[in-house]
Every structure is written in structure tokens, then in C-alpha cells.
Amino acid sequence: MNELTMNLRTDSRIPLYEQIYRYIRSDIRNGKIPYGEKLPSTRALARYLEVSRSTVELAYEQLLSEGYIESEPYRGFYVAQIEGLYYIQKERSEPEKEEEKGTGYSYDFTPNGVDLKGFPYNVWRKLSKEILMDDKTELFRSGDSKGEYSFRRALCNYLYQARGVNCIPEQIVVGAGSDYILMLLSIVLGKDYRIAFENPVYKQAYRLISSLGYETVPISLDKSGMKVTELAASDADIAYVTPSHQYPTGIVMPVKRRMELLKWAGRKENRYIIEDDYDSEFRYKGKPIPALQGYDGAGKVIYLGTFSKSIAPAIRLSYMVLPESLLKIYNQSGKFIHSTVSKVDQCIVQRFIEDGYYERHLNKMRAMYKSRHDVLIEELKPLMNSCRISGEHAGVHLLLTFRDGRSEKELIERAKERGIKVYGLSDYRIQNIEDEEATILLGYANLTEIQIREAVKILISCWN
């Protein structure tokens, strides 16, 4: 073969050498240039295409490095055997699947929302570029099974300053998401525990722990959170609680109830409290109450945290702080499990915290959510004759409890008919309560202030 026909575009953003590389690669993949075929010399192809010889040499070097062609000394370049070479074909466009189409809702008050428009893209891009600027081969080796020490040290400092958590980096274990952390914790704990859950409950944690084979028991709530008297009578060994912002009721557990929980845990050697502090960053009234772990002097609290709510769900970076007694067990039975979070991601989040970006991001998001929170409460005032608001002092959702005898199902259906999706509290219960007043959850993180105003006007018209 003495020439290759291709149309090069000098006005394209794609460099000439890459255009040549793509043409030849495509012809080899499609069988237009068969295995064993000799390619034109770099000099001949450069003359034919009217480009510099170095441009063709760059294209050939890329094809060589990827295994599409082979070089034989004094003979030239030949098409290699490409069976087994990995490449990704562009997916064919397919008809849209039914489940991927719009849901039919104009507004969705999901309580699990995160406003990704507030994600710090420019900062994230800058940190990623800086971290990957140098050829640090260490970034791509297997790291510490607990997570990188420098990241855990930064996390340790943040937790102490922001949440009052007392720990050292050695106590922190990092993992990809809360589900992974709970599965790892189950290896550390073993299966000989009965775990008490708040009712209503954060269903994902409850489902996961139940699926791992643990015996579970629901404990009802009062205005201060999990009832310790009921917990004491349940024969449970572990209490799973969300004291900073109970999900989904929004209860903030006062210090007195926290002390009662710690006293319950201290009565037996192998009793523990799992403190899930998943969205403690968003509080709108008063100062944040320090984490329960900060009051624990007996090593009874297993502290869980995540960046999914405060940064973005796709970050998939969660962690747990193990008390000394369980840390010893982890070092014996769980340390062999490698960390599931890449070093690069850990480095980015470390810099995000240390350089002050995280603090600024939280302040920005807190102000944004507070503004939406205030708009929602203001717009809901016409409904206050038939319902009451609760859980509005923290998190990114609030609750409406109706006192006029209507059912959750009726309220949800009426909203659905008008294109609005709302959520019932009963969906979060382990055991339903008879004659319970209908309670609706309204999340506001995913809606703009304008959307909130529009949606609430419709809700008032169909609920009043």
C-alpha cells in the first residue's frame, strides 16, 4: 500500500496527527486494511497528504503504542493482529425506555434531594488538575485499607472543630458510601447483636442491616427522639440513632436524652450506639448540637458520616469512627479489606477541606437551603388551619401533619392529580401506628424558590 485516502481538516480543533491516527485506526478496525498489510512509509504518506513527516510519525507512534500496527526494522510498518484488542463502540441510539421517560410530575418534593447546581465545579476541576499535574505513581498504588492517613487526619481535624468528635486518624475508616461502611461494620461486630431502630426510620440503613441477618426491633419516638425506657425493655445490644436530625421526623435530640442513651449503653460491656450524623451540617435555628460521640467517655459510640448530602451523592465517600474496643477487632478481622475509595478522590476532598473550600461551600449551601426553607414555610401559611409544621429547624425537608381526619393516601393522590409528588411518613415506618394523623414530607433542596411558590399554590388549592 503506497497511499491512504483521507480528508484532513486544517480548520478542525483535532490535531492533524490525531486525524491521521483516527482514520487508520478506523480502517483497521473495519477490516478495510487487513492484517499483515504494509502501510506507507512516514515520508511517503507525509508527501501524499502534504503534511510534515513528524505529523505522520506521531500518528504511527500512537498506533504502535495501542497495538494496531507493528514495526519491522528496515522493512516498515504492518497492520497487527487486533483480535482481543479492547475498544469501546459508540452505543446505537435506542428508543427511550418507558421507565426513563418523565414521571408525569411537574414538581417533586423529594426529601432526599441535593442541589447539584450548587456543586463547586470550578474548585473541583482546579483541585483535580493540581493533584494530577505531577506524575505521582503513588496515587495509583493500593493504599491504606482504612483510607489515606493524610485524608483521615484532615477529616479528624474537621470532625473535632465542626462536630466535637474526639478521635485520632487511626480510628477512622473510609469507604465508598454508607452501605459499604455498614457492611464493613457488620464484619467487625459479628452477628450476635440485636439492633434497635428508631420508628419511623431511615429505611436504607434498616433494610441493609436486616438483610445482613441481624435481629432488629423498632423503638418509638417522643419529642426528644428514641425512647430510652422502651429501648431498655427491648433486649437490644445496639441502638441505631440519628440524634442531630432524626430522619425522617426532623427531631433534634436534646443533651438530656443523649446522656440517657449513653447511660443505657454503659450498663453492659458489649452495648453500642451507632450515631448516623448524615446531614448535621444544615441547621437553621440555634447552634448545632455537638455529636453524641463527643460526650462519650466510655467508647460506646460508633460514629458514621458522609459527604453525600453536603457535597454530592456521586462522591460516594463515607466514613466511620470506631471506638478503641472495636478498632482492635477491625485490625484483626477487617483490615485485610482494601479501601473502596480511590486515592485521587481522597486527595481532592482532603484539599477541599484543608484549603477552606468545604467551609465556604457549606456556608453557601446552608444559606441557599435556608432561603428555600423560609419561602416554603411562608407559602404554607394558608394551610395552618388544618395542619401543623414540624422538623423545620434542620435538614432539607419538613413535615406537615394534618388534623382534619384525611388520610395520607388521599392527600398524596390529590397532589398527584395536579402533577406534584409528595411523600407520606408511613412509608418510613417499620410498624404502622393505628389512628395516626396523616403526615406529609416536603423536601425543598431540588426546587427553586419560584418552583416552591408555584407548587405550594397548587397544593393549597387541592388540599384546602
Image (spheres, grey):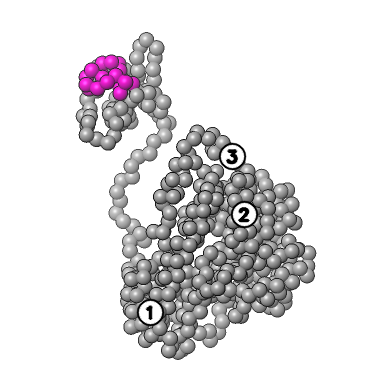
Can residue 198 be seen at all in this image of the molecule?
yes
Q: Is residue 264 above or below residue 434?
A: above
Of badges 1 and 2, nearer the viewer stands 2
Name the residue carrying label 1: 379
Q: Is residue 357 left or right of residue 22?
A: right
| N-terminal-most mark, 3 or 2 | 3
Q: Which residue type carries mark 3?
A: Ser
Q: Residues within 10 Å of mark 2 (few under 14, many from 20)?
A: some
Amino acid carrying label 1: it is: Glu
Q: Sort mark 1 into few (<14), some (14-19) or many (20+) by Cα contacts within 10 Å.
A: some
Task: Kindly identify the amino acid type of the residue bearing the numbered disc 2.
Answer: Asn
CA–CA distance between discs 1 and 2?
Answer: 40 Å
Can you tell which quarter of the image residue 246 is in?
A: bottom right
Left or right: where does residue 306 sit relative to residue 91? right
- SS majority, magenta: helix
Q: Which residue is mark 2?
A: 157
Q: Residue at x 30, y 22 (%)?
A: 56
Q: Name the residue beneath numbered marker 3.
A: 142
The stretch in magenta equals 41-57
Cα–Cα span, label 3 and label 2: 25 Å
Q: Give the image quarter of residue 442.
A: bottom left
Q: Position of residue 204 (x, y in %)?
A: 54, 64
In the visual, does 303 lie left or right of 235? left
- Is the C-beta separation of discs 1 and 2 under 8 Å? no
Name the residue rendered at 74%, 64% in the picture. Answer: 297
